[in-house]
Amino acid sequence: MTSQQPASAYFIAENEEKSERHTLSVVVDNEPGVLARVIGLFSGRGYNIEQLTVSETMQARHISRITIVTSGTAMVVGQIKAQLERLIPVHSVLDLTVEGDAIERELALVKVAGKGENRVEALRMADAFRARVVDASNNSFVFELTGKTRKVDQFVALMKPLGLIEVVRTGIAAISRGPEAMRV
Amino acid sequence: MSEAQAERMTGAEIILRALVDQGVEDIFGYPGGAVIPIYDELYQQNKIRHYLVRHEQGATHAAEGYARSTGKPGVVLVTSGPGATNAVTGLTDALLDSIPMVCFTGQVPTTLIGNDAFQECDTVGITRPCTKHNYLVKHVDDLARTIHEAFYVATHGRPGPVVIDVPKDVQFGTGEYVGPENIEHKTYKPQVEGDMVAIEAAVELMAKAKKPIFYTGGGVINSGPEASAALRELVELTDFPITSTLMGLGAYPAQGKNWLGMLGMHGTYEANLAMYDCDVMICIGARFDDRITGRLDAFSPGSKKIHVDIDPSSINKIVAVDIPIVGDCNNVLNAMIAEWKKRKYKADQQALANWKAQIDVWRARDCLAYKPNNDVIMPQYALQRLYELTKDRDTYITTEVGQHQMWAAQFYKFDKPNRLMTSGGLGTMGYGLPAAMGVQVAHPDALVIDIAGDASVMMTIQEMAMSIQHKLPVKIFILNNMYMGMVRQWQQLLHDNRLSETYHDGMPDFVSLAEAFGAVGMRCSDPGELDDAIIKMIETDAPVIFDCRVVNVENCFPMIPSGEPHNKMLLGDEVTDENIGSAIDEEGKVLV
Ligand SMILES: Cc1ncc(C[n+]2csc(CCOP(=O)(O)OP(=O)(O)O)c2C)c(N)n1
């Protein structure tokens, strides 16, 4: 009895579904190891983390907010949400991409070095992007820029030929529009 | 009593007190430097019995056996470093099979943590991915609350193992004890009641089904005996056929008239074909594991699927379902029964009769048939006899992992829940022997049998010493085929019978081995003497190792080969010595 069918008992389906990018907001107890649990979940189950930002947001209640940008098929993103909710210190998870139209911002510090034409052009561009000069020397600037990821990407790309030295980015902070708060 | 005076006591005292208040009577453990204060407290009390294992893995499996046969959490106590790392296999096993367990690990004093101190390891780091949750307790005042919370987490929602890492200075320190009253987790509140709208839709779908099937799993057992009773009632009401995973055996009786046998890789022909052909699948407390589904894109292609699970992450993880219901099996089953009765539903009798007639055709294929033999014991025969000779007693079965485990599932007829203890998710060889000890601790007067393989049993054989020390008269029934049979079967089917490292040279004499431990050793190789030998084993009031010599190279069928859907099973009588090497195609061989 031979079979024409390939694949295996560990069946790995060819995935034709397309991968989507989602921003998740996760409310957690700010206790030791909580970030390790979240990150361990992603690495252990093979999920992507594109960006991750953490900070305590309700000090009195020791509650932190983790913002994660991830990508996967709709089924995988649903799993990521369910798996995160399964972690004991996680209070709630909101898929801001499904909620729609959330506000997302990140901050970047961009160091550029150069003289003459390039230096002038860098300043002009920074002005157009509303980046602030937070450090300057004879031959360098550090710009501070906030905005959507795409805007930061664009700015960095423009700085490349003008003497880009290094970039540091925070990853995004995201929040839903309107009067409601996320359930904690 | 007036305002409860906060009682002050040492950390070690808090642990013992909290265990008593949690209703714990038996714990499994092994001492060491980092837990001596707790052992010192154990020594000075008599409410909690401690069972001394011979390797910490044994403690975890014993606790699993205890938990699975009673529904109560199993409790483990081990030392830091190697004590904790030795417990990792059992913790992972309990996580995959959803077994409630609380494991205390000793830790070096808080001041030394991070210094690579003697017998220090990052226990919470190591056990984070193999527990449901874990804690490092740094202050003695947090200890009592943490312990009560740990029991809550281990036993609520989908059960699982929880580790509490307790540094030695916390055990010595003095702090406040708080009782378990009102302790639950501030955010962990699993949903146990199913959504009524979904339940109504599910029951309506069931009532319209023409080819329905129940596919149930370990979740029904974990939900308690009431859930099994509800399942039986719902099956009776609807008269639908039912199959189950390995972990779910016994929830519906194997003698029941709607029973199809186990499904999956070594499941029955009728169960797997019915899964393939059904039009409505009602999955209750099972998780579409790959050993169950086989080839995913051909899994039950024409059916509408209802999935009941207490863990939302189990739903739509592998198979997209039409009606998901998050909730405890017992609650949802009872709600389904009530809804079915309220609407006075009745299944389509004609369709159901046709469906059952089809199933009877498949059943007539007699997929578990094997060639009888008068000279050597067939493993299937041995299990049939074991079943016949033990079925009227209060019997609990554990297994190791391999062919014998699958034959036990096929040939031992489980009629009650909590009677089969086996490592399903992790497939841990060495599980069954210590698990049997745990079962025997919980049920001192029951007959507890570990159906073992000769390779598996060697992995935790040292626990025989525990059975002697604590007078646990377990019966280790080894189906000795001289091989790691299951691996040998795959080598034969997939690798041109190159039996790389699967033959046991250096097999111990199991009879002398039993005697060396102070247990009773028996051997049988003649089918004609088997019954008498089994009866003698049952009647021996001591631990027994029974070396049952069986035919060496029997294969376990039916089998869904690698990469195949349910309707492409290999059946024992189709596979001959000549065609066995080509029974599975090339691509399937690569992908196991
Ligand atoms: C700890 C562990 N190591 C390896 C395996 C892989 N494995 C699965 S079944 C098996 C052979 C088991 O042989 P035996 O206990 O003699 O049982 P049989 O299959 O012969 O009935 C092996 C090595 C496993 N499941 N667990």
Image (cartoon, rainbow, N blue to C red):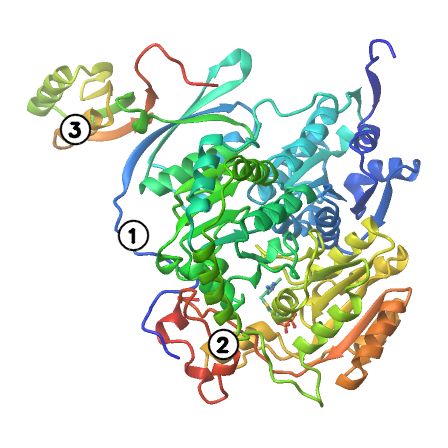
Q: Residues within 10 Å of mark 3 (few under 14, many from 20)?
A: few
Q: Nearer the viewer, mark 2 or mark 1?
A: 2
Kind of residue at badge 1: Asn
**Helix, strand, or loop for circle 3?**
helix
Q: Nearer the viewer, mark 3 or mark 2?
A: 2
Chain of the residue on which disc 3 is drawn: A
In this picture, residue A174 sits left or right of residue B402: left
Q: Which residue appears at 36% of the width and 65% of the height?
A: A7
Kind of residue at badge 2: Leu
Question: Is residue A48 visible from the viewing direction of this image?
Answer: no
B203 or B22, nearer to the observer: B203
Q: Which residue appears at 84% of the width and 18% of the height?
A: B7
A127 or B265, nearer to the observer: B265
In this picture, residue B197 sits left or right of residue B188: left
In this picture, residue B487 sits left or right of residue B519: left
Image quarter (top left, top right, bottom left or bottom right) of the C terminus of chain B: bottom left
Q: Quadrant of residue B376?
A: bottom right
Position of residue B253 measured from the top left corner of the image (x, y, whole percent): 66, 57
| Residue B571 image label | 2
Chain of the residue on which disc 1 is drawn: A
> Is B188 rendered above or below residue B577?
above
Quarter, ligand 1: bottom right
Position of residue B338 measured from the top left corner of the image (x, y, whole percent): 57, 36
Position of residue A31 measured from the top left corner of the image (x, y, whole percent): 56, 25
Number of disc labels:
3
B386 or B243, nearer to the observer: B243
| Residue A15 image label | 1
Which residue is the site of mark 3?
A: A154
Separation of disc 3 and disc 1 at Cα?
Answer: 31 Å
